[in-house]
Image (spheres, rainbow, N blue to C red):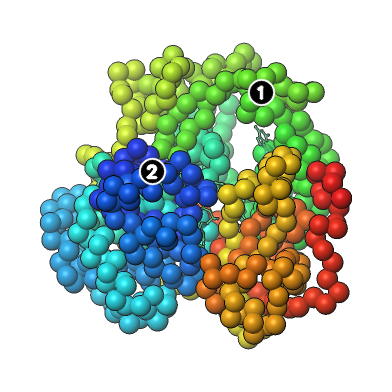
Amino acid sequence: MAGLAASFGSGAMTNSINEISGAACIFAIGTNTTANHPIIGRQVTRAVQKGTKLIVVDPRRIPLCRIADIWLRLRPGTDVALLNGIMRVIIEENLNLLNTSFIVERCEDYEAFEASIMENDLATAEGITGVPAQDIVKAARMFGSYIPATILYTLGITEHSHGTDNVRALANLALLTGNIGKPSSGVNPLRGQNNVQGACDMGALPNVYTGYQKVENKKVREKFEKAWNCKLSPSNGLTLTDMFEAAHEGKIKALYLKGQDPVVTNADTTFIEKAISHLELFVVQDIFLTETARLADVVLPAASFAEKDGTFTNTERRVQRVRKAIEPKGNSRPDWMIICDIAKSMGAEGFDFGSPQEIFEEMRGLTPSYGGITYERIEKSGLQWPCPDHEHPGTPYLYSARFSTPSGRAKFASISYRPPAETASHEYPFILVTRRSAFHYHAVMTHKVEGFDELRGEEHIEIHPADAASLEIQEEEVIKVTSRRGSIKAKTKITEVVPAGVVCMTFNFAETRTNILTSRAMDPITKTPEFKVCAVKIEREESAYLMKDYMRWGTGKT
Ligand SMILES: Nc1nc2c(c(=O)[nH]1)N[C@H]1C(S)=C(S)[C@@H](COP(=O)(O)OP(=O)(O)OC[C@H]3O[C@@H](n4cnc5c(=O)[nH]c(N)nc54)[C@H](O)[C@@H]3O)O[C@H]1N2
Ligand SMILES: Nc1nc2c(c(=O)[nH]1)N[C@H]1C(S)=C(S)[C@@H](COP(=O)(O)OP(=O)(O)OC[C@H]3O[C@@H](n4cnc5c(=O)[nH]c(N)nc54)[C@H](O)[C@@H]3O)O[C@H]1N2
Ligand SMILES: [Mo]
């Protein structure tokens, strides 16, 4: 999300979910909404039924391709080249003519950006992306002439070693066409976990306190030091991925992990396990005994969302109440209680909170964008930040008057295409893309529900018919997939959903650790790994075993 922050000032959906239906054009790039954000997916399908134009950009033939006006099937990891091509057409054909005043009044650094776009022609874009130049022109004309247009994106954009570049290129596209700061437009990252937006808002990031107040800003730090009556570090902390690198090097000795299963879900899990083994103390707080929790010195049982009160902030910045439906099971307790007890037993002051509401009250007093949000005001329905005071109605879309950069203007960025860290080679001739499925939620939680496993009980690696034929691989055959980091086995699904040269897997199954394969190459700013691209080879496995004969972890089934 750092790309968006650099261009506009903050990293969240700029607009609201119900505005999607008002867009004249939807540009859905690297996002499989019908599976992963079904409520938003419904909005998209309904809008298209009512006449909204839809452009889909994805290497896989996702369900939205069926109703798209244009589907651009690009090579994985080549979005910047494609977007720069689209913007070149928009500039050359003067499709942004109506928008010149927006560029003059609200943006900066346009000239350098235009010059950088003109450096590469459409033949170059076609060569890099594999998308025919005439389709790039068609998409540019459509996006440039149907106004307002909204951009939706997710991991196909961010989980790359150049994810920030991808996001900034999308921000350029919105600025160039004036599609920001008004309804049914914007650059909209559809966030992942139910409360990941809330976690970021609450400062669960290495460089900010609540509401994106910077750790390195002296005034901010002094405010928090005064409120909490303690000294705070003037330097940023480490990102998740950096923490494991540091643990591996012995620079971090103790790790307290909460609500994450990194030995299944982080990139290069063999490395992650090694890093964990170097720790002197490893504490895991989770609602289940995960694969990662099995490696912990101490496991703290947490209560699930249904067993506690609090708030979640969703992808459109809407802060909503969550209410306890049942009492916590066994000896599990809400996360906040466990954290407060640990803090108190370490001698910290100020952790005598009696309820989540008391914590919220303290937080909002220190967080301008949440200042006007109270439990009373969100008793029935949520409020969208920024909501600075009690009279403020909340903000459905951002940047109507100014951007939150120091100058108040949005910055065009000159972004040139960089290839992914790994490309296909003689030894590793396939690109592995990883993705989600509608029937599971990552790795651990949904496997506790038998019905989901009936819908999808084991991993299938998608492979194109031409590739299967040349390797003489059959449908449902167990094959060996090897990257520079390790090997796993999985059954095949032969399908044209993936293009030739690309194979695709989910990471839903602890017994088929897809992330043994993925690479730790990461974006230099967000430190997000390149989950969407790594090079692999595929081999037939004559003596193959069947996955389902293996002990099914967690379910007790064999
Ligand atoms: N059912 C279900 N829903 C979920 C989740 C789940 O596990 N299950 N997880 C949640 C979470 S945490 C998140 S973050 C979201 C993620 O939601 P999505 O981002 O939609 O999830 P993915 O399926 O990982 O990836 C999206 C798409 O990116 C495409 N893609 C891959 N590489 C590229 C590329 O280089 N360029 C482009 N343009 N596209 C590419 C893939 O083909 C795929 O269709 O889903 C959330 N919703
Ligand atoms: N190959 C590949 N790998 C990926 C991705 C990809 O696209 N491809 N996507 C990445 C992305 S976007 C994400 S978000 C991650 C997801 O990776 P994780 O966050 O590790 O995956 P989850 O299984 O959602 O893990 C959430 C954990 O939180 C626990 N939990 C649930 N509720 C609570 C609670 O209230 N309190 C506590 N303490 N614990 C709770 C669950 O039991 C579970 O163990 O995976 C990443 N890994
Ligand atoms: Mo996510």
Q: Residue at horizontal 64%, vertical 47%?
A: 440
Q: What percent of the width, then of the height, locates residue 279? A: 79, 48
Q: How far separated are the C-alphas under marks 1 and 2?
A: 31 Å
Q: Which of the two residues, 197 or 305, is positioned nearer the viewer here?
A: 305
44 vs 260, left or right, is: left
Helix, strand or loop at mark 1:
helix
Residue at left offset 48%, top offset 64%: 61
Q: How many marks?
A: 2
Q: Which disc number belongs to residue 362?
A: none
Q: Residue at x 30, y 18 (%)?
A: 391
Residue where numbered disc 1 is placed: 307
Q: Is residue 233 left or right of residue 130?
A: right
What residue type is disc 1 on?
Glu
Where is residue 138? Give x, y as percent.
27, 69
Residue 144: quadrant of the picture: bottom left
Residue 553 point in image, percent of width and height? 81, 48
Q: Residue at x 25, y 75 (%)?
A: 118
Asked if residue 271 shows in the view, the reply is: no
The part of the image, by quadrant, that contains residue 56 is bottom left
Q: Nearer the viewer, mark 1 or mark 2?
A: 2
Q: Is residue 88 above or below residue 20?
A: below
Kind of residue sitting beneath label 2: Gln
Q: Is residue 358 left or right of residue 299?
A: left
Judged from the image, the quadrant occupied by ligand 2 is top right
For the residue labelled by badge 2, is the local secondary structure a helix, a strand or a loop?
helix
Per the image, the residue denoted by label 2 is 43
Where 389 falls versus 301 (above or below)?
above
Q: Nearer the viewer, residue 204 or 541?
A: 541
Q: Residues within 10 Å of mark 2 (few under 14, many from 20)?
A: some
Looking at the image, can residue 376 be seen? yes
Q: Residue 15's quadrant in the figure?
A: top left
How far across and down, in percent of the image, does residue 227 sit? 51, 22
